[in-house]
Image: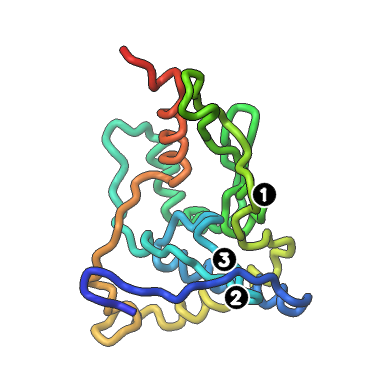
Amino acid sequence: LERKGYGWVEFLEAHAAPDGAAVHRYAERCGVLLAMVYLLFGSDCHSENLLASEDQPVLVDMETLLPPSPAPGAEASPADQLFSRLMSRSVLRTGLLPGWTMASRQRKLDESGFGAGEDVSRQRVLRWTKPCTDFMSIEVATPDGPAMPQAPAILDPEPVVEGFRRTYRFFWDRASTLTDSGGMFAPFRRVTVRFVPRATTIYMQLLQESRTPELMADG
């Protein structure tokens, strides 16, 4: 529900798929979602931005759709420029497909929308110990309480492939009319979008590292 300067969205409660048929439909719709995000040049669709409501995958944060595509800086090496160019054209850019992220030298995580499952919600966080005392400090710990609801990891890729193929073909057959004045994508021409130059995990890592005791000392 759009208003001037703000908006409202309906609350979504996560629910597991009730049976095998619903699981199959969920995976197929994940393929549809992947194709849509890919065609809209979306990114940052990690596990915290995707919820499952029975057989429906739902993105809860779509601020990175239709972003600008800046060219690599002049200081970038030829290898970095090639990687940036290939990544910008790949479905891996979306963040939905499984992939490992190094949380530390000893630990790696899959934070993707389709591959993370519930394990990523138990990743370690910084918290205060012995607060309001002379011995107060920050430590790395596993969060207490129930895990955050996460979309389930997809174990069978075939329905995802089929959903992606069908959706991509649908838009491919209509490519010449999509951006016409009355086309499906025409309303997006003047939409204000957010530009996120780096992956969310980089900002989170920077935030956590900056709060370690060694970096919070005087001098």
Q: Residue at x 31, y 12 (%)?
A: 219
Quarter in which the N terminus is drawn: bottom left
Residue assigned mark 3: 51
Residue assigned mark 2: 56
* Number of marks in picture: 3
Say if mark 2 contacts mark 3, CB within 8 Å.
no
State how far apart marks 2 and 3 are (Cα).
8 Å
Task: Tell me if mark 3 has few (under 14), some (14-19) or many (20+) residues whose alpha carbon lies within 10 angstroms of its own.
Answer: many
Q: Indicate the secondary structure of the residue bearing disc 3.
A: strand
Nearer the observer: mark 2 or 1; the answer is 1
Sequence-earlier tag: 3 or 1: 3
Q: Indicate the secondary structure of the residue bearing disc 1.
A: helix
State how far apart marks 2 and 1 are (Cα).
20 Å
x and y, in percent, of residue 21 in the image: 75, 79
x and y, in percent, of residue 101 in the image: 57, 41
> Which amino acid lies under the numbered mark 3 shown in the image of this protein?
Leu
State how far apart marks 3 and 1 are (Cα).
14 Å
Task: Tell me if mark 2 has few (under 14), some (14-19) or many (20+) residues whose alpha carbon lies within 10 angstroms of its own.
Answer: many
Compared to residue 28, the image places residue 135 above or below, namely: above
Q: Nearer the viewer, residue 110 or 119?
A: 119
> Which amino acid lies under the numbered mark 2 shown in the image of this protein?
Gln
